[in-house]
């Protein structure tokens, strides 16, 4: 792997994560650390326009979205175990 590509990808990933975190804090100024983490993760993983996925009920969304929410749930489980 070209080290410059690795460094660039890491830089972009961190910048994207920072943007999602800042947005989560602005949109939920009184949100818990868990709420902020979940919205940040959803925005980073699913795209900025889908940062609200973290609070959706899997029973009320399409099969595709429900599958994606399972990934978010796994993130939450790991986050809570720390």
Image: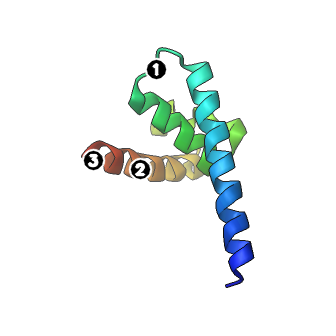
Are discs 2 and 3 less than 8 Å apart at CB?
A: no
Are discs 3 and 1 less than 8 Å apart at CB?
A: no
Q: Which residue is at 54% across, 35% downward?
A: 39
Q: Secondary structure at mark 1?
A: loop
Above or below, 8 relative to 20: below
Visible residue check, residue 60: no
Are discs 2 and 1 less than 8 Å apart at CB?
A: no
Q: Can you tell which mark lies on residue 82? A: 3
Visual colour scheme: rainbow
Q: Which residue is at 48% across, 37% downward?
A: 38
- Callout 2: 10 Å neighbours few (<14), some, many (20+)? some
Answer left or right for 27 relative to 72: right
| Front-lying residue, 7 or 70 | 7
Disc 1 target residue: 31
Above or below, 73 relative to 9: above
Visible residue check, residue 3: yes
| Front-lying residue, 18 or 71 | 18
Return the disc, 3 or 1, that comes first in the chain's sequence: 1
Closer mark to the observer between disc 2 and disc 1: 1
**Marks 2 and 3, Cα distance to the nearest angstrom?**
11 Å
Disc 2 target residue: 75
| Front-lying residue, 66 or 79 | 79
The extreme left residue here reads 81
Q: Residue 61: image x %, image y %?
A: 56, 39
Above or below, 80 relative to 23: below
| Front-lying residue, 65 or 19 | 19
Q: Residue 79: image x %, image y %?
A: 35, 46
């Amino acid at each position: 792997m070209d080290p410059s590509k690795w460094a660039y990808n890491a830089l972009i990933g961190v910048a994207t994560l920072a943007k999602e975190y800042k947005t989560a804090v602005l949109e939920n100024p009184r949100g818990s650390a868990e709420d902020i983490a979940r919205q940040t993760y959803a925005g980073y993983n699913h795209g900025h326009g889908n940062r609200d996925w973290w609070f959706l009920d899997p029973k009320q969304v399409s099969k595709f979205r429900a599958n994606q929410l399972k990934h978010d749930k796994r993130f939450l489980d790991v986050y809570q175990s720390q």
